[in-house]
């Protein structure tokens, strides 16, 4: 027998709270995403554009000069390999030793 | 000493403000009914945790700068003079605390969200039948159910009372605010490692560790009197 689903109308307070909750979440996400988006835009913009006052939502001229300069440094490959090696090695070693060490600690006696 | 005072003040103020924030964020995210939107918000909220402070210091130096920064741009729209946030002694601590919260709130709220997800939904239904509003349900069911996790996190953060985030403070420091910006970690770095005064830095780290262990014991015994969710 099919059950009739009774959709209870949410109270006014509940809907107001939902409205403010979504609003707060959207503002919060903008404060997290905007600095990162600003960074991306700055990395592609010209030198004069980066000093422009105000909110950067979009830029007109996309330039790869900054990236060209970064990748022309010879130490960058070294730095990347160091970081990756450290992160991967540390994670693997930490997982292995932590799980081995947690086993005796989890015993009751 | 000035350095210990800076450390303690920063840590205590940051504890007061950044300890409840992940709990509140977890409660708010929990109230979102649509599953996909909840997951999207959660993912966005813990994005900043993975950025290193070298990158974040560059971002914040640019965002808070008096000429081209967006915060000062908004202030100028309201007619307030532009404030040089990172070079004023009064604003350094709020900047450190707020950016610390910005970075950590999403990550810390994962723990609380995981423990909220393990609450028996029959409790909620029973409360709804009894006439509890959403606020009542959050206050009287959700919060008491995550009390063990909250107490555990509180005790753990008590143990690191003298330890501040070295990366954050070191990257946000500049010579004009050294009086409020020098904490134990950066002081040990400047005196102990740059000047090769190794004995001094070892002594300070030993001192910090002992104070941390003592705080852990004290916090555990104090909380034992109030609830049974302690470490031992």
Image (cartoon, coloured by chain):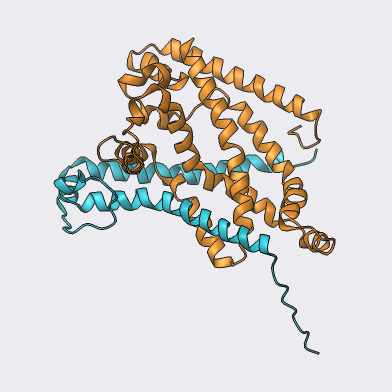
Chain colours: A cyan, B orange
The image quadrant that residue B175 belongs to is top left
Give me the residue at 61% from left, 60% from top: A16
Give me the residue at 64% from left, 58% from top: B31
Q: Nearer the viewer, residue A14 or A60?
A: A14
The number of numbered discs placed on residues in the rendered structure image is: 0
A18 on left or right of B73: right
Q: Is residue B106 above or below residue A8?
A: above
Give me the residue at 24% from left, 49% from top: A42
Q: Is residue B231 above or below residue B115?
A: above
Q: Quick one: which residue is furthest to the bottom in this view? A: A1
Where is residue A12? Give x, y as percent.
67, 64
Where is residue B182? Give x, y as percent.
41, 19
Q: Nearer the viewer, residue B30 or B188?
A: B30
Where is residue A52? Give x, y as percent.
20, 46
B211 on left or right of B194: right
A105 on left or right of B96: right
Q: Is residue B91 above or below residue A87?
A: above
Q: Nearer the viewer, residue B110 or A88?
A: B110
A98 on left or right of B86: right
Where is residue B198? Give x, y as percent.
41, 13
Q: Nearer the viewer, residue B157 or A95?
A: B157
């Amino acid at each position: 027998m099919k059950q009739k689903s009774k959709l209870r109308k949410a109270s006014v307070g509940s809907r107001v709270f939902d409205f403010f909750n979504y609003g707060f979440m959207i503002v919060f996400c903008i404060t997290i995403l905007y600095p990162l988006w600003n960074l991306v835009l700055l990395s592609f913009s010209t030198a004069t554009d980066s000093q422009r006052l105000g909110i950067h939502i979009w830029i007109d001229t996309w330039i790869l000069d900054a990236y060209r300069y970064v990748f022309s440094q010879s130490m960058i490959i070294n730095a990347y390999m160091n970081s990756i090696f450290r992160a991967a090695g540390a994670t693997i070693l930490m997982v292995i030793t932590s799980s081995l060490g947690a086993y005796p600690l989890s015993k009751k006696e | 000493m000035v350095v210990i005072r800076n450390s303690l003040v920063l840590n205590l103020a940051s504890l007061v403000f950044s300890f409840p924030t992940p709990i509140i964020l977890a409660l708010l995210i929990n109230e979102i009914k649509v599953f996909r939107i909840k997951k999207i918000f959660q993912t966005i909220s813990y994005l900043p945790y993975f950025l290193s402070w070298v990158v974040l210091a560059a971002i914040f130096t640019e965002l808070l700068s008096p000429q081209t920064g967006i915060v000062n741009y908004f202030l100028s729209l309201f007619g307030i003079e532009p404030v040089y946030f990172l070079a004023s002694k009064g604003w350094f601590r709020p900047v450190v605390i707020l950016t610390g919260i910005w970075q950590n709130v999403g990550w810390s709220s994962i723990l609380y969200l995981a423990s909220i997800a393990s609450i028996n939904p029959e409790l909620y239904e029973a409360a709804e039948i009894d006439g509890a509003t959403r606020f009542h349900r959050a206050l009287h069911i959700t919060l008491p159910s995550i009390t063990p996790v909250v107490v555990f996190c509180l005790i753990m953060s008590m143990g690191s009372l003298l330890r501040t985030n070295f990366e954050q403070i070191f990257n946000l420091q500049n010579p004009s605010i050294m009086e409020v910006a020098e904490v134990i970690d950066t002081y040990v770095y400047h005196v102990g490692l740059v000047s090769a005064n190794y004995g001094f830095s070892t002594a300070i780290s030993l001192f910090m560790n002992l104070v941390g262990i003592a705080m852990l014991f004290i916090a555990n015994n104090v909380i034992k009197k109030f609830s049974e969710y302690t470490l031992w």
